[in-house]
Amino acid sequence: MTDAPRRRPTLDEVAERAGVSRSAASRVLNNAPHVRRDKREAVQRAIRELDYVPDTTARALATRQRGAAALVISGESPSIFADPFFARVIVGASAALEEADLHLMLCLAASDRSRRRLAELLRARGVDGVMLMAVRENDPVLRVAAETELPVVFGGRPVGAEPPWYVDVDNVGGARQATEHLIARGRRRVVMICGPLDTQVSRARHRGYREAMILAGLEPLPPECGNFTQLSGAVAMAELLERHPDLDGVFAANDNMAADALRTLRGAGRAVPGDVAVVGFDDLDVAELTEPSLTTVRQPIQDLGREMARLLGRLIAGEEPSSLILPTHLVTRSST
Amino acid sequence: MTDAPRRRPTLDEVAERAGVSRSAASRVLNNAPHVRRDKREAVQRAIRELDYVPDTTARALATRQRGAAALVISGESPSIFADPFFARVIVGASAALEEADLHLMLCLAASDRSRRRLAELLRARGVDGVMLMAVRENDPVLRVAAETELPVVFGGRPVGAEPPWYVDVDNVGGARQATEHLIARGRRRVVMICGPLDTQVSRARHRGYREAMILAGLEPLPPECGNFTQLSGAVAMAELLERHPDLDGVFAANDNMAADALRTLRGAGRAVPGDVAVVGFDDLDVAELTEPSLTTVRQPIQDLGREMARLLGRLIAGEEPSSLILPTHLVTRSST
DNA sequence: CTGATGATTGGGAGCGCTCCCAGTTTCGCT
DNA sequence: AGCGAAACTGGGAGCGCTCCCAATCATCAG
């Protein structure tokens, strides 16, 4: 009844109630050794009775560990909800972070201001480590990452650099599988709708396409680049149709672009998969909703988040884990 | 060259270098009064020279303010990426939080374990306040919210309770607009595809539908409930067609369900909007991609996040802001 | 020139927890 | 019983910052 402005109990109060020293109580809290059984139990009882919860902040100050990790998503905010990609990464990361008893701090690093805040967060030791996603070429967030002493795990590799720790998806392999699948279906004039070439993802997928074509003794055609939106897929497809009227296979660097490539093809009177077979990448929901449904390369997005968080967790724990490349696999549907 | 294991400078060092006391330096830091101009400048110089950044944790301990707010998303994780809803909320909240110089802690409260961690985070004063989204009836997360002394802002209202602070969207008004629009288009047998009735959102949208019908002197028909997925929209539509073969208008509680209702209608040989007019809700991307494109009610999702964060910011600052209901508006496309 | 008034100043006590360390007990053996 | 080792114990010094407060300084009217 008199608990309105009641202060939260401190460790000292727990200790007093249990009749031990603060040190002993602390040991129980962190279940460290060197506490006699009866005292340990007394402390535990006191904790329960007082409904004690240790103050994170005080603990953080003493241990120099914040108990939190930042997930930084670079690039313009709109892109974060263009597709469910980031949401899935977040779900995966969140789950793994929970495992390591870390909290998730989400930082959208789109503006200069937000990058400055991020830099301060890191310098002020507001988190124990960083996961970095969607970094583009010359992304200013790279400087922030370079300056910090905290462990940084990249999601996907930035263009032109191999960061010490990263988790990536096997984009090259996936793209090769996709292309090989088209070739296996008897396609010879296979074109590619690529993403923006200033991203590692796009480059890797393009490389996979080239490798597969060359390996099959076919001539890789110069790709047409979109920007991962549906509209850009339509535009690229139209261009490719004009350039290679005899094309019989299309590999698009993501499902969004593939979806509208599909429409464009139908609009141009090409039957899919009769005249032209199409493969996408990502396996987003849209892939099942296109007409015909889309053969695509599934990438383990949630796993990507999970593994980033695990890697970071180990790094924070002082272990020496190594980077990871996650496998992709082809999901065959009606468009091939 | 010798800066490898360099400790971060502390306020004491800044003070010493500037030839003032720690207190004075602190005052400069928080630009409090009672510091002579020259000393203030000396401190600022020292800060610059030492590249000093105050330690958040220490400050948090002393001030009892964490500088962070939690955004809690309840419910199963999969739903977080079912549509871009949450991503938009996050973008809005993140921007407004930045304004208030607060960091964003994202908590997915799906499992018991995560709820327990959340409860601890709050009790351990790991954040200064909470935003709570997607709460369902009898959601266990409500207990966590009830127990904390921290300010809590709801996004949408939970069923059967009016929390002290919330930001909601005018679901009733939006649904009424949608229904009135159908009626204005001459429809008389207007049915509704509803969402799960254990959510406030669904109830409110249903209420708007009823109000509009009754106001127009028409008979509200019992709704068919889906679960906001496309598939459930198709199922519900089929059921409604069977029950009311003469229906000429459909109001769906979200765009996903509307999208597949559209397909079902076409599959059943009904022309849209010729025979049947359809209105959705949300104005997701899908609304522009359906055939025909979907008339729908746009809700300001990003604003929802922004206003939640602002409200919370004021609450944390000790002000006494009041709750908010954001307007919705009809976006007319080809389905009506 | 003096006391009063108000602006500065810096010492010191926390905030709540961890951890080192010296001192005390408890044991297991011979 | 005697001894050294191993297991406990609690005092105290931080972690880096804020903020109260008594003390010092400047300034100015009388």
Image (tube, coloured by chain):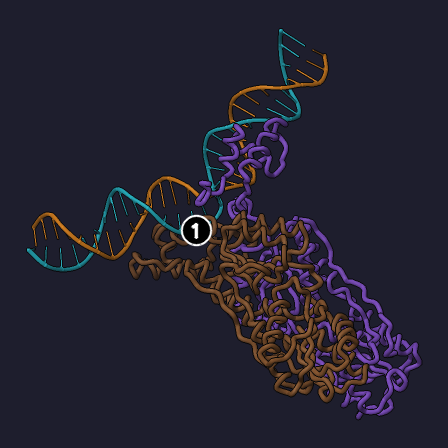
Chain colours: A purple, B brown, C orange, D cyan
Residue behind mark 1: B63
- Determine the residue positioned at 55% across, 35% down: A49
| Left or right, residue B43 beside residue B262 | left
- Determine the residue positioned at 71% across, 68% down: B225
Q: Quadrant of residue A265?
A: bottom right
Give the percent coordinates (x, y) of residue A1.
46, 41
Which of these two is toward me, B253 or A210? B253
The correct choice, above or below, for A240 with respect to B260 in the image is below
The correct choice, above or below, for B62 with respect to A199 in the image is above
Tell me the subunit letter for badge 1.
Answer: B
Which of these two is toward me, A2 or A216? A2
| Left or right, residue B158 beside residue B195 | left
Identify which amino acid the numbered label 1 is placed on: Thr
Label 1: how many residues lie within 10 Å, few (<14), some (14-19) or many (20+)? few
The correct choice, above or below, for B278 with respect to C3 in the image is below
Count the marks: how many? 1
- Determine the residue positioned at 54% across, 47% down: B124
Q: Quadrant of residue A300?
A: bottom right
Is residue A254 in sight in this rendering?
Answer: no
Q: Quadrant of residue A261?
A: bottom right
Give the percent coordinates (x, y) of residue B261.
74, 77
The correct choice, above or below, for A49 with respect to B136 in the image is above
Which of these two is toward me, A271 or B226? B226
Give the percent coordinates (x, y) of residue A284.
76, 71
Which of these two is toward me, B205 or A31? B205
